[in-house]
Amino acid sequence: MDRFTELHAALHDFTRRRDWGQYHDPKSLLLALVGEVGEVAELMQWTREADVRADLSQGDGKAQISDELADVLMYLMLLADAVDVDLIEATHAKLERNEARFPTSQRQGNAPSHARHPRGIGR
């Protein structure tokens, strides 16, 4: 069993034993996910860009960012389950589409242009 599958099983076991699945509708999971992403952003808010990596790479900062990113991943996994999306499969498919949209020969070292791609790389 790979690490993602093990994590997925552990997460479902955790929520099952607490009977929390009853609260895991897509809207509620999305709002929880957004809240957790906000907590990640809060760790960087008002911190100079040059200091962010140093602040989050050790000690309390590392522990805080680790906890918040773990929360984001758990809610993302639960949301994907709630809408019946295989995250690994979906990510591979999206990466393949992005490979075609952003060929290395044209994009190497250049960020996607928002003028050409107003909705960003994710669209």
Image: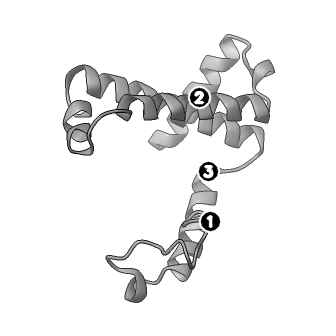
Q: Is residue 71 visible?
A: yes
- Could you tell me which secondary element the residue under label 1 belongs to? loop
As shown in the figure, which amino acid type bears the numbered disc 2? Gly
As shown in the figure, which amino acid type bears the numbered disc 3? Leu
Depth check, front residue: 102 or 16: 102
Q: Nearer the viewer, mark 1 or mark 3?
A: 1
Q: Mark 1 highlights which residue? A: 119
Closer to the chain start, of discs 2 and 3, is 2
- Could you tell me how far apart the alpha carbons at marks 1 and 2 are, in whole angstroms? 22 Å
What quarter of the picture does the C terminus occupy? Answer: bottom right
Q: Nearer the viewer, mark 2 or mark 3?
A: 2
Q: Quadrant of residue 121?
A: bottom right
Q: Is residue 105 above or below residue 97?
A: below
- Residue 17: x and y, percent? 67, 12
Q: Mark 3 highlights which residue? A: 87
- Residue 20: x and y, percent? 72, 16
- Could you tell me which secondary element the residue under label 2 belongs to? helix
Q: What residue appears at the point 28 percent right and 28 percent down from the top-left corner?
A: 62
- Residue 42: x and y, percent? 43, 29
Closer to the chain start, of discs 1 and 2, is 2
- Could you tell me which secondary element the residue under label 3 belongs to? helix
Q: Mark 2 highlights which residue? A: 35
Depth check, front residue: 83 or 121: 121
Marks counted in the figure total: 3
Q: Is residue 81 above or below residue 118?
A: above
